Image (spheres, helix red, strand yellow):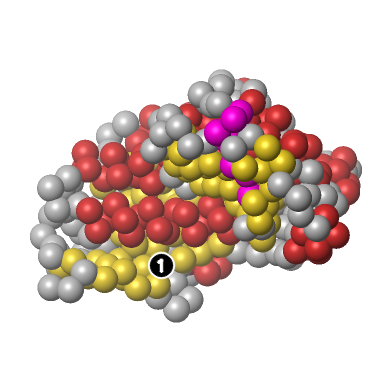
Amino acid sequence: MKEKIEEIKRGTVTSPQGFVAGAVEAAIKFKGRLDLGILYSEAPALCAAVFTKNKVKAAPILVSMKSNGKGRARAVVVNSGCANACTGDKGLRDAADMAALTAKKLGIRADQVMVASTGVIGAILPADRIQAGIGKIELLRDGGHKLARAIMTTDTRPKEIAVRVMDDSGHYTIGGIAKGAGMIHPDMATLLSFLTTDARVEAAFLARALKAAVNDSFNMLTIDGDTSTNDMVSIMANGRADNETITSKNGRMFREALGRVCRYLAYSVAADGEGATRLIEVFVEGAKSRSQARKAARLIAASALVKSAVHGNDPNWGRVVAVLGRSGAVMDEGMLDVFLQGEQVMRRGSPLPFEKDKLSRRMKADVVTIKVCLNIGAGDAVAWGCDLSQEYVTINSEYTT
């Protein structure tokens, strides 16, 4: 069989067989917007997840971590507008109640429901509106589009994708949605993302594949250097597709497809960063190791000085080199090459002449690329970020007022 991965037009998290979703306007923070939703697998499903490494974990994260220990889930219930973080025992009860109400609605056990929340930290969930809203949610085959909008906070657009995979194991689909625009920094997932697949897959392999995909996508994403209390990425696999069980032995295409879905969502989050006018794509090549390349790429993408220079169309490549020098990556300045928007500005540690005004104009593009070649090894990585604008400051200076 010819191996193939193809993107599904208007694909979303309910594109795989056996998944439905829905969302309602529950007025959790604002009236007139979708802010509460459910994703449901009509068949029993395996579940793998990764969670924030922040030592301050929101109540829904604690509830979901406990449920995910069993490796199975049928549903996710999620709200925006209130993070239910730093809310003590009351918050834990509210998160558990969200799971119980969803389970009752669906006729499943509460420990089969993952819970997620996003929004303002320190605010108490409006339990009455949550309860009423869950009861009103209609689950539909194309409901993933509504769910993608319901999880948005300061996002300006939904992020969703699905791909169809054909390989030696058979045919199956992987879909996903994500939200994130601020409080984004690589330290697990840095956002909320829900993934689904109808593939038959081994549980241990699913967990490993998710972790690898997150490491190369969401963990290479940074907006503002802050890691949230509510970060979570999960995947449910319900086995509805007619394929041979995927394991590490025959899982190459599954890993590739899942990585593609996660990279698309991570890229979309970076492009929609709070106040962003440009996406920054940082390539590090020739590092001593892949881990060092990853660390250097993330630090460059996160640098406030680099982000400010990109916003001002300033080809100040010295800031890139300065960040690289403090990244911890093994380097020899005399071996270093640097490129901005494809133009080499440093070769083997020495500056190259370039037309500053011309390069500045090229930096007004929607995507600004930075490439650093250390030329001492085979490690490479790519990270994504966005510029730092006045709009970002405005959004975050007025977030609760």
Q: Residue at x 35, y 41 (%)?
A: 212
Residue 187 seen in the figure = no
Q: Please determine whether, in this image, residue 87 is positioned above or below residue 37.
A: above
Q: Is residue 350 left or right of residue 291?
A: right
- Return the residue nearer the eye: 31 or 391: 391
Q: Which SS class for mark 1?
A: strand
Q: Residue placed at 88% from the left, 48% from the top? A: 390
Specify whether residue 166 is in view.
Answer: yes
Mark 1 residue type: Ala
Which quadrant of the figure has residue 216?
A: top left
Query: Disc 1 designates what residue?
Result: 162
**Residue 228, image x and y in percent?**
62, 34
The residue at 72%/58% (across/down) is 278
Left or right: 96, with 321 as reference point = left
Relative horizontal placement of residue 106, taking residue 220 as reference (left or right)? left
Viewer-proximal residue, 174 or 139?
174
Answer few, some or many: residues within 10 Å of disc 1's Cα (few below 14, many 20 plus, some between 14 and 19).
many
Q: Position of residue 111 (x, y in %)?
A: 35, 38
The quarter of the picture where the N terminus appears is bottom left
Residue 337 sits inside the magenta stretch: yes
Give the residue drawn at x 21%, y 69%: 3
Q: Which residue occupies the extreme bottom position in the image? A: 9
**Residue 145, percent from left and from top:** 52, 69
- List x then y, in percent, for residue 85: 63, 31
Q: What range is drawn magenta here?
A: 333-339
Q: Quadrant of the C terminus?
A: top right
- Relative side of 261 to 345, left or right: left
Q: Is residue 94 above or below residue 392?
A: above
